[in-house]
Image (cartoon, grey):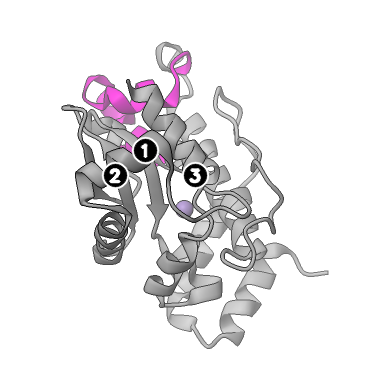
C-alpha cells in the first residue's frame, strides 16, 4: 500500500508537473510526528469532502493533516524551553512579535502565523457557503467598497497579485475601517494591529492538485464556500 507522500508524488508526476514537485514534496515531508507542546491541530469543522466540488477532499486532507500540522509542530518546537511563551495564545504571540526573544521571533511569525491563519481559514469556509454577506456585514461592505461586487473585485485582485506565497485578507484596521490587503508568506494581519475577518490562502499547496497554475479559477471557486456568518461574527466581535 502506498502512503500519502507516495500518492501525492505519483499524482503530481502523472500530471506532468515535475517543476513543482520539489517545494510541495518538501513541505509535505516536513509534517512528522506531533512535537509535544501547548499548541495542537484543531480538527476540521466539517468532513474533508464538505467543500466539494469547489475545494477537493484530497487537497483539504493534505492541507490540514500535513501542512497545518507542520506549522503546529514547528511552533511547538520553536517555543520548547520557553515557558514564559507557552502560556500565551498564538494570537497574543503574533500581536507582540517585536517583544519576543530574537531566537524565536521568525519562527513564531512563520509557524505561529501558519497555525493562526489556517485555524481561521477552515472556519471561514463551509459546505453550501458562498452567496453574499447579510445584515451589518453587508452594510459595512457596501459602505467601504460600494457594494459586494466592488469588494469581490478588490479582494480577487489582491489574491491574484500576491507574488509567490501569501494570503489575501479582509481586515478591520486600527481605525476600525474595513480594508482589503495581502500579506506575504504566513504573516498575520494581527502582527500589524489588524483583525482578520476573511482570508484566502493562495499558497500553491492550497490549490495545485485541482487547479494547477490556475489561481484565478481557485479564487472564483473559493467564493462558493465562504462562510459569511463566521465573517459577520468576527466583525461583531471587533466592536
Ligand atoms: Mn495553507
Q: Residues within 10 Å of mark 3 (few under 14, many from 20)?
A: many
Horizontal and vertical percent position of residue 99: 23, 19
Task: Tell me if residue 8 comes above or below residue 186 in the rendering.
Answer: below
- Residue in the image at 31% along x and 40% along y: 139
Q: Place residue 116 in its image quadrant.
A: top left
Q: From the image, tell me which residue sits under label 1.
A: 137
Q: From the image, tell me which residue sits under label 3.
A: 124
Say what secondary structure mark 2 lies in.
helix
- Residue in the image at 65% along x and 78% along y: 10
- Residue in the image at 69% along x and 54% along y: 48
Instruction: Compare residues 154 and 193 and report the one nearer the observer.
Output: 154
Residue 103 covered by magenta stretch: yes
Q: Which residues are magenta?
A: 86-112
Say what secondary structure mark 1 lies in.
helix
State whether the magenta stretch is mostly helix, strand or loop. Answer: helix
Image quadrant where one finds the C terminus: top left
N-terminal of the pair, mark 3 or mark 2, is 3
* Front tag of 3 and 2: 2
Task: Tell me if residue 220 comes above or below residue 229 in the rendering.
Answer: below
Q: Label 1 vs label 2: CA separation?
A: 6 Å
Q: From the image, tell me which residue sits under label 2.
A: 141
Amino acid at each position: 500500500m502506498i502512503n500519502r507522500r507516495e500518492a501525492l508524488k505519483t499524482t503530481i508526476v502523472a500530471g506532468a508537473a515535475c517543476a513543482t514537485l520539489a517545494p510541495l514534496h518538501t513541505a509535505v515531508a516536513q509534517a512528522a510526528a506531533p512535537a509535544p507542546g501547548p499548541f495542537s491541530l484543531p480538527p476540521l469543522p466539517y468532513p474533508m469532502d464538505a467543500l466539494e466540488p469547489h475545494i477537493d477532499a484530497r487537497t483539504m486532507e493534505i492541507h490540514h493533516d500535513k501542512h497545518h500540522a507542520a506549522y503546529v509542530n514547528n511552533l511547538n518546537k520553536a517555543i520548547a524551553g520557553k515557558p514564559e511563551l507557552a502560556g500565551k495564545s498564538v494570537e497574543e504571540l503574533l500581536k507582540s512579535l517585536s517583544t519576543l526573544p530574537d531566537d524565536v521571533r521568525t519562527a513564531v511569525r512563520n509557524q505561529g502565523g501558519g497555525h493562526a491563519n489556517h485555524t481561521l481559514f477552515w472556519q471561514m469556509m463551509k459546505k453550501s457557503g458562498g452567496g453574499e454577506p447579510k445584515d451589518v456585514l453587508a452594510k459595512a461592505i457596501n459602505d467601504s467598497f460600494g457594494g459586494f461586487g466592488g469588494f469581490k473585485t478588490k479582494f480577487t485582485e489582491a489574491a491574484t497579485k500576491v507574488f509567490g506565497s501569501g494570503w489575501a485578507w479582509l481586515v478591520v484596521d486600527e481605525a476600525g475601517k474595513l480594508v482589503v490587503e495581502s500579506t506575504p508568506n504566513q504573516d498575520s494581519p494581527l502582527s500589524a494591529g489588524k483583525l482578520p475577518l476573511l482570508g484566502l490562502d493562495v499558497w500553491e499547496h492550497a490549490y495545485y492538485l485541482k487547479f494547477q497554475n490556475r489561481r484565478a479559477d481557485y479564487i472564483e471557486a473559493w467564493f462558493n464556500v465562504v462562510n459569511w456568518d463566521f465573517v459577520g461574527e468576527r466583525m461583531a466581535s471587533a466592536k
